[in-house]
């Protein structure tokens, strides 16, 4: 793996762990596609740093379990502000 890719993957993982952010938020922060971030933290990170991978996996699993709640809140806000 290229060094710049490994560095990018580590930075993305550190950001997700420290801010408990979603893949989409990390993609916006680093100005890359969410597909790239997802591949980086779910596939590439495992070969680079196993412990960091497990920490990121915890955050992503938590985000996944809360996804339906965030969607409901977003829909509620959409219709509250629509007049």
Image (spheres, rainbow, N blue to C red):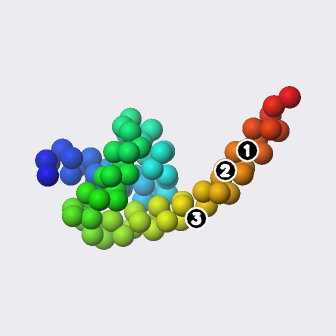
| Residue sitting at the far right | 83
Mark 1 burial class by Cα count in 10 Å: few <14, some 14-19, many 20+: few
Q: Earlier in the sequence, mark 2 or mark 3?
A: 3
Other-residue count near label 3 (Cα within 10 Å), few / some / many at <14 / 14–19 / ≥20: few
Question: How far apart are labels 2 and 3 at the CA level?
Answer: 12 Å
Q: Residue furthest left?
A: 2
The image's mark for residue 17 is none
User: In screen coordinates, is 73 left or right of 42?
Assistant: right
The residue that mark 1 highlights is: 75
**Which residue is denoted by mark 2 in the rendering?**
71
Quick one: SS at disc 1?
helix
Q: CA distance from mark 1 to mark 3?
A: 18 Å
Q: Are marks 2 and 3 in contact (CB under 8 Å)?
A: no
Residue 65 disc label = 3
- For the residues labelled 2 and 1, the Cα–Cα distance comes to 6 Å
The residue that appears at 75% across and 38% down in the rendered structure is: 78
Q: Position of residue 1 (x, y in %)?
A: 14, 52
């Amino acid at each position: 793996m290229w060094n710049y890719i490994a560095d990018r993957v580590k930075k993305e993982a550190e950001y997700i762990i420290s801010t408990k952010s979603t893949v989409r938020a990390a993609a916006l922060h680093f100005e890359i596609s969410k597909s790239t971030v997802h591949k980086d933290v779910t596939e590439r990170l495992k070969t680079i740093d196993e412990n960091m991978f497990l920490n990121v996996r915890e955050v992503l699993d938590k985000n996944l379990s809360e996804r339906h709640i965030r969607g409901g809140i977003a829909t509620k806000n959409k219709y509250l502000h629509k007049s």
